[in-house]
Amino acid sequence: MRWENLTDSDHARAADPALFGADAVTTRTFDTPEFRGITFHEVRARSILNRVPGASRMPFEWTVNPYRGCTHACVYCFARKTHSYLDLDTGLGFDSQIVVKVNAPELLRRQLASRRWQGEHVAMGTNVDCYQRAEGRYRLMPGIIEALTERANPFSILTKGTLILRDLEPLTRAARVTDVGISVSVGFTDHDLWRTVEPGTPAPERRLEVVRTLGEHGIGCGVLMAPVIPFLGDEPAQLRATVRAIAAAGATSVTPLVLHLRPGAREWFMAWLGRHHPHLVRRYERLYAEGAYAPKWYQRRITRQVHDLAREYGIGPTRAGAPRRIAEPPAQPVRDDPVQLSLI
């Protein structure tokens, strides 16, 4: 395991100094049902505020990622590639070898107090889910939220986890003093599909209950309808059922994002597809022949269908990232196709 390759960017491999040395790593396992088969690598990080590379399509510049690897085990997760930087397996290893930055809250507090920090928006849950199962044991997010609240620093959270409701009180306090944006990821409501592609996540209806509960407490919550999975979750009836459920939960917005398959995720997803839906393998090879993203015509079709349904059910479409209430980025060339954010 090459800990020296874990640099201050969770988005790309770089030649910067390592965040910590091998002597700073403690490896643990817990013999409890919820953590059986999972190994935790506890580290004391040297930096926790990560600048997003300039070439990124993300609508934010800074992130905080207290974990690497994710027990949600989503077969399509683009962050799988980051495990290869540590010589860890990007398949089952990504699902079961979890790096935990145990000093994240104290480190964030110190970095936010630096004179160099200008109070920029901080996005969380953009690489792996900060409310995955490990958070139930390590409880890093309350301290992170508290550190951001102390500085009235704007932030956002994207999650598939219902554990976020544990932190309802600190989130409510934060929303009184700064701009807080919450988004929940629900790409579909089909239970058969959910059980196979997102086996470690709460059921879609439980995630939508998070949306409802946050709204009842005055915290507006958008839904990233992501990913829309070609040929498995894109039938008109499936899209309608999902948007209808999102609207019923009181979501402030819905943003459809079509599945994309970057290296690392592509191999794992295609192997899964071959086992569960072998008749679709050739169709996927054709659809994604040009790279990680589905063709623009397909993305536009899904976006148009979901936006039409959103208007029908009384929730307006929004650009990617809007639920987080991030300031508009500098003007860029116009793109008609949506961009899938990191999930979780």
Image (spheres, grey):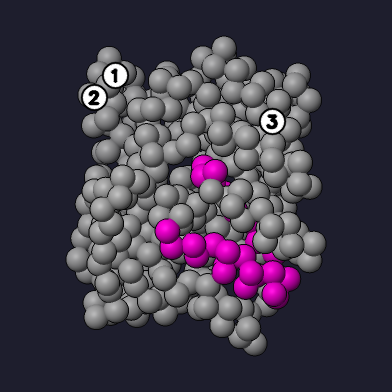
Residue 75 in the image: above or below residue 119: above
Any part of residue 48 in sight: yes
35 up-or-down from 282: above or below: below
Q: Residues within 10 Å of mark 2 (few under 14, many from 20)?
A: few
Crowd band around label 1 with a 10 angstrom C-alpha radius: few (<14), some (14–19), many (20+):
few
Q: Kindly report the distance in space between the C-alpha atoms of the residues bearing marks 3 and 2.
A: 35 Å
Q: Which mark is residue 249?
A: 3
* Contact, mark 3 vs mark 2 (Cβ under 8 Å): no
Residue 93 horizontal/vertical position (percent): 24, 50
Amino acid under label 2?
Answer: Gly
For the residues labelled 2 and 1, say whether their Cβ atoms are less than 8 Å apart.
yes
Q: Is residue 161 above or below residue 69?
A: above
Q: Residue at 35% x, 46% y: name it.
A: 34
Q: In this view of the protein, which residue sits in the foreground, 17 or 147?
A: 147
Q: Is residue 260 visible?
A: no
Helix, strand or loop status at disc 1: loop
Measuring from the top left, give residue 98's x and y in whole percent: 32, 57
Do residues under tags 3 and 1 come within 8 Å of each other at their CB atoms? no
First-in-chain label (3 vs 2): 3
Label 2 to label 1: alpha-carbon separation: 6 Å
Label 2: which residue? 274
Closer to the camera, 230 or 96? Answer: 96
Residue 277 is tagged as 1
Q: Residue at x 26, y 38 (%)?
A: 267
Give the number of callouts.
Answer: 3
Residue 246 tag number: none
Q: Mark 3 and mark 1: span between their CA atoms? A: 31 Å
Of marks 3 and 1, the one in the foreground: 3
Q: Is residue 301 magenta?
A: no
Q: Earlier in the sequence, mark 3 or mark 1?
A: 3
Q: Identify the magenta region.
A: 137-162
